[in-house]
Image (cartoon, grey):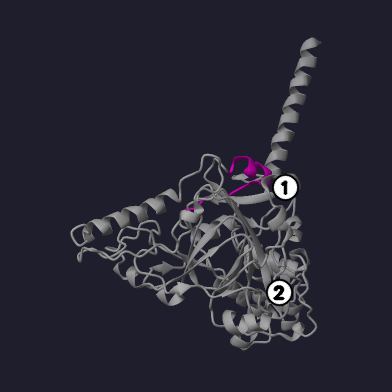
């Protein structure tokens, strides 16, 4: 047996097989359906280096530099809010809820045909499949148009979940009451033909990512490893990302990447994963694997506490997401798709807390401007683009009577719509507004149709004049 077994040949063969499985996982199928997903090795099998001069996993996909610590903690039923807070949110500890949305209308109905017929006239934001946070391109188009081309083009949808689609998804029991209920600030809709790959990154908000269709693999990393992964946060974003290429980790540039501990999970249809705020992760899907996801973004109070007083009479019976109070939404005809903005109640709390931190009873225009600059740190290019005018914001939206100052009661009395208007004036929108360059949605279609009618009318008028 010893004569037939060659360790060097064995490691070479295992490495070739491993890389072949990773490579074929990103090949399209001939019919555009899921192909060989059961053969994809995840978590990838760690292979020690047989060359002492080369670190294991050098120039290979992220996750092959060391074995995982194990899977993410799993539950077969959704936790109640207090337990969710105590065991996971407060501890910044990920979890997986298996089959949490398995019986939802979205899980049972969201075929391409159904989505196009029911929701094809709604605008969505699209991005390139291979994420790049330094120079990504966000476009806007009709969901129906996307469905027509997404099997052939290098695009995927990541957008605010349109209001009409919310009725097809459940509000998870863990978010039904308490502080979470008041701080549910954005819902997202994701759709692709597969073959997507995120950068190694973290998000500013707590996030429950639920899979409606397909498969997604998650690599989860504690925030303590952010320096090792060279994770940075641009001043204009609440999230951050690593400069390491997750498809080919260069251990000559980042030798400590092999020290990064990680856990993992594979989501199937109906499963949900909780990703805590600031928790580093990387997400993969595979070509020929149509994926649809919905995510629920939420935060807790400014002092990072949980109040469960509203949970006393909660029955936790099934109810759709359309019954939840969500801060940022999108409906047909909206000029902006409000994605990635501040949580408006946390925004309000920040201003209320500033009275104590500044030791004042009145907030003047100058102090308000300083607070806005502190909250919304932007680079010069973005400042010039959105033309933020704190003087106009203060006098038009906050102090229309011209008192010259704001009190705590003034801030408490502000409607969420006013707070959202302030935020829109202070931050750059995530994607094109209706009718702007990059928009190929309903406003663009209407503009094209109007121009075509005008051209036809002018042509008819010319023909009439020629006949005379």
Residue 408 located within the stretch drawn in magenta: no
The residue lying at 67 percent from left, 44 percent from top is 441
- Up-down: is 36 above or below 98? above
Q: How many marks?
A: 2
- Going by the picture, which residue comes out furthest to the top? 467
Which mark identifies residue 114? 1
Crowding at mark 2 (Cα within 10 Å: few <14, some 14-19, many 20+): many
Q: Residue 195: where, in percent of width, then height?
A: 50, 50
Q: Which residues are magenta?
A: 135-150
Name the residue beneath numbered marker 2: 173
Q: Quadrant of residue 364?
A: bottom right
The answer to whether residue 234 is visible is no
Q: Going from the N terminus, do you reach mark 2 or mark 1 first? A: 1
Determine the secondary structure under disc 2: helix
Q: Residue 155: where, in percent of width, then height?
A: 55, 47
Figure quadrant of the C terminus: top right
Q: Residue 403: where, in percent of width, then height?
A: 74, 76
Residue 137 located within the stretch drawn in magenta: yes
Q: Residue 101: where, in percent of width, then height?
A: 68, 64
Q: Nearer the viewer, residue 441 or 409?
A: 441
In the visual, does 218 lie left or right of 118?
Answer: left
Figure quadrant of the N terminus: bottom left
The answer to whether residue 245 is visible is yes
Q: CA distance from mark 2 to mark 1?
A: 27 Å
Determine the secondary structure under disc 1: helix
Q: Nearer the viewer, residue 357 or 330?
A: 330
- Up-down: is 178 above or below 286? below
Q: Nearer the viewer, residue 303 or 279?
A: 279
Crowding at mark 1 (Cα within 10 Å: few <14, some 14-19, many 20+): few
């Amino acid at each position: 047996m010893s004569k037939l077994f060659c360790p060097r040949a064995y490691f070479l063969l295992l490495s070739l097989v491993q890389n072949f499985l990773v490579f074929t996982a990103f090949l399209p199928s001939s019919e555009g359906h899921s192909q060989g997903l059961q053969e994809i090795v995840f978590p990838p099998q760690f292979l020690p280096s047989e060359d002492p001069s080369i670190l294991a996993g050098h120039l290979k996909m992220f996750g092959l530099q060391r074995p995982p610590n194990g899977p993410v903690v799993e539950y077969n039923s959704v936790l109640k809010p207090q337990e969710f807070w105590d065991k996971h949110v407060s501890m910044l500890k990920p979890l997986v809820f298996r089959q949490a949305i398995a019986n939802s209308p979205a899980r049972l109905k969201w075929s391409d045909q159904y989505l196009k017929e029911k929701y094809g006239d709604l605008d969505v934001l699209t991005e390139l499949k291979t994420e790049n946070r330094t120079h990504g391109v966000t476009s806007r188009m009709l969901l129906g148009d996307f469905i027509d081309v997404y099997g052939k083009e290098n695009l995927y949808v990541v957008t605010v979940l349109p209001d009409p689609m919310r009725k097809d998804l459940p509000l998870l029991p863990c978010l039904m009451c308490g502080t979470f209920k008041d701080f549910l600030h954005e819902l997202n809709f994701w759709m692709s033909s597969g073959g997507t790959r995120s950068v190694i990154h973290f998000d500013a908000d707590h996030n429950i990512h639920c899979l409606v269709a397909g498969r997604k693999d998650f690599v989860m990393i504690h925030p303590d490893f952010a320096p090792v992964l060279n994770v940075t946060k641009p001043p204009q974003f609440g999230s951050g990302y690593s400069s390491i290429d997750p498809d080919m980790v260069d251990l000559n540039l980042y030798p400590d990447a092999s020290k990064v501990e990680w856990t993992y999970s594979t989501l199937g249809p109906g499963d949900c994963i909780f990703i805590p705020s600031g928790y580093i992760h990387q997400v993969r899907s595979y070509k020929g694997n149509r994926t649809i996801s919905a995510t629920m973004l939420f935060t807790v109070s400014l002092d990072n506490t949980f109040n469960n007083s509203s949970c006393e009479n909660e029955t936790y019976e099934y109810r759709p997401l359309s019954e939840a109070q969500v801060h940022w939404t999108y409906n047909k005809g909206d000029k902006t798709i409000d994605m990635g903005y501040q949580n408006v109640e946390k925004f309000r709390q920040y201003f209320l807390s500033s009275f104590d931190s500044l030791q004042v009873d009145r907030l003047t225009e100058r102090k308000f401007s300083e607070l806005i600059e502190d909250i919304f740190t932007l680079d010069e290019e973005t400042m010039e683009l959105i033309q933020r005018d704190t003087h106009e914001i203060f006098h038009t939206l906050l102090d229309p009577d011209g008192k010259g100052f704001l009190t705590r009661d003034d801030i408490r009395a502000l409607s969420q719509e006013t707070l959202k208007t302030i935020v829109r004036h202070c931050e750059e929108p995530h994607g094109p507004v209706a009718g702007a360059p990059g928009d190929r949605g309903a406003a663009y279609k209407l503009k094209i149709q109007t121009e075509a009618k005008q051209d036809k009318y002018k042509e008819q008028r010319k023909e009439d004049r020629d006949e005379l």
